[in-house]
Image: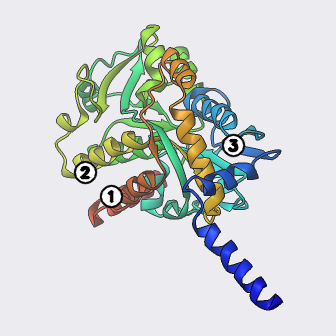
Amino acid sequence: MKFAKATISKALTVAAAFALPAGTAYAQGADYYNGKTVTYIVATAPGGNYDTYGRLVAEFMQRHLPGSTFIVRNMPGAGHLIGANALYASKPDGLTLGTFNTGLIYTQIAGHRGIKFDLNNMSWIGKAATDPRVVVVAAQSPIRAFEDIVKSKDVLNFATSGPGGANYVEILGLTATMKLPIKMLSGYNGTEDQLAMRRGEIIGTIASRSAYDQFVKNGYGRYIAQFGGLEKDLPQMSTLVQEDDAKRLVQLISVQGDIGRLTAAPPGTPAPQLNALRAAYKKAMEDEELRARAKKGEMPIEPLYGDDVAKAVASALQQPPRVVEMLKEAFAADKK
């Protein structure tokens, strides 16, 4: 009889577990964070938009995970590869997450030897913005239109963060496919490229539009072309290129702007913790104070969450053979 009662009791407990409300799994995951410290890796130096977005996300996720403490850890280097590699290799206990450049999609497609991750396997939490890429040049530069770059008789210095960074791959690819007279100078993180433009050290770069809006409004630079996006005030790069390979690359670059300011956790993050992080991220993105601060800082907020981000990244990684070959050729050209 005792055995029967124990069996019945166990069965009722299991049944009750299956009958828990849908939000209970999140509640259990959220409780896990009470009294715990979460490390948010930003794969670039302090300053600049990646750092600003990362700190804003970390601050408001902490607010929506009661009892948690978020610490931002900057891990710059190798065009975000160092930070992304560290995030991927972190213990999947729900206590490490972070952000990195979407240009790593290019780098993975090309099979760069420095990659120690697979973006398909990341535990995706969300993306904060749709942020089109732009070609921006220094105000004192003689370059007034993209055609001026194409026709330039002088070598033009363009800034990049380094191998793995979005602008590194984008500038490298366009230079190779269009035979542009551009010399790439690497190692510019945060706002260092803007300072270099003001010093006259570089002519321009490719960047997220939001990262340069204030710089341009202050009269230090000007936009000459844009990749995708809804804005109508700039020439679209898709109308400025003729070469088939360049057109394919421009199309891929335009896609990257649709999934800007990503946040992810390591592969294998347990479902309760991942669901709690995703829920906190969603609440953060919908927080009126976050949106007000982002608007004041001219930082676009157009979020996407969880599996939808995973699908978008997986789709971007699935490129036709010629695009894969082209990106590999661009990386190979840089080594010559």
At 69% across and 43% down in the image, what residue appears? 40
Q: Amino acid at mark 2?
A: Arg
Residue occupying the far top of the picture: 218
Q: Report helix, strand or loop for mark 2.
A: helix
* C-alpha distance separating marks 2 and 3: 34 Å
Which residue is under mark 3? 40
Which residue is under mark 2? 248
- Is residue 20 placed above or below 289 in the rendered structure? below
The label on residue 326 is 1
Q: Report helix, strand or loop for mark 3.
A: strand
* C-alpha distance separating marks 1 and 2: 9 Å
Foreground residue, 133 or 36? 36
* C-alpha distance separating marks 3 and 1: 34 Å
At 59% across and 46% down in the image, what residue appears? 80
At 25% across and 47% down in the image, what residue appears? 246
- Is residue 254 placed above or below 202 in the rendered structure? below
Task: Place residue 16 in its image quadrant.
Answer: bottom right
